[in-house]
Each structure stands twice: as structure tokens, then as C-alpha cells.
């Protein structure tokens, strides 16, 4: 097994996928995101999904919701 492992090329941990997300809030407002999936550990299939606001209106709504919590 070691003879196979040592010469193996490292696996690139790159973004695997991007997709758009439309999320309708409980208030009926549609939020727009781009989801970017990143692989953290290809062998254990660990990944994270970043939801990035696509527009200023979505960002404003999120900031207002966050401020309302404090």
C-alpha cells in the first residue's frame, strides 16, 4: 500500500460547483444567492457551501435581519 501511496499525485481541492439559489423568506421576499461548493476533504467527502448574496437588495435584507437580532 505504501508503494502506491508515496508516488500518488496530490488531489486538487478546488471549487466543484456553483449554482443559483432563490430563497423565499417567511415574509414572502425572495433572496438571491450564488452557492459555491468547496471540497475540504475529497476522501471523506467533506465540503462546505458558501451562499453569497447576488445583489444589493439581498445583502440589505440580511443586514437588517442581523441587526434586528441584536
Image (cartoon, grey):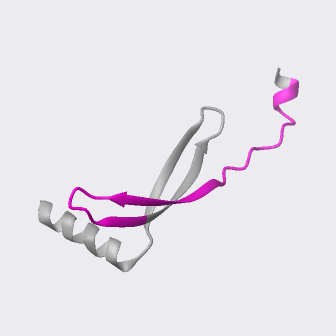
41 to the left or right of 66 = right
Extreme-bottom residue of the structure: 56
Percent coordinates x, y for residue 70 in the rendering: 11, 62
52 to the left or right of 4 = left
Q: Residue at x 26, y 71 (%)?
A: 61
* Residue 24 occupies quadrant: bottom left
Q: Nearer the viewer, residue 36 or 10?
A: 36
Q: Is residue 16 magenta-colored?
A: yes
45 to the left or right of 8 = left
Q: Which residues are magenta?
A: 3-32
36 to the left or right of 21 = right
Percent coordinates x, y for residue 3 in the rendering: 88, 25
Percent coordinates x, y for residue 64 in the rendering: 20, 70
Extreme-top residue of the structure: 1
Q: Residue at x 66, y 33 (%)?
A: 43
In the rendered image, the quadrant that contains the N terminus is top right
Q: Nearer the viewer, residue 2 or 66?
A: 66
Q: Nearer the viewer, residue 10 or 6?
A: 10
Q: Is 70 placed above or below 39 here?
A: below
Q: Residue at x 67, y 50 (%)?
A: 13
What count of labels does the image hold?
0
Percent coordinates x, y for residue 42 in the rendering: 65, 39
* Residue 14 occupies quadrant: bottom right
Q: Is residue 62 magenta-colored?
A: no
Amino acid at each position: 500500500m505504501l508503494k502506491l501511496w508515496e508516488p500518488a499525485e496530490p488531489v486538487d481541492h478546488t471549487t466543484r460547483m456553483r449554482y443559483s439559489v432563490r430563497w423565499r423568506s417567511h415574509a414572502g421576499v425572495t433572496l438571491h444567492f450564488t452557492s459555491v461548493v468547496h471540497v475540504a476533504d475529497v476522501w471523506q467527502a467533506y465540503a462546505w457551501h458558501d451562499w453569497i448574496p447576488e445583489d444589493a437588495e439581498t445583502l440589505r435584507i440580511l443586514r437588517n435581519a442581523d441587526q434586528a437580532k441584536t
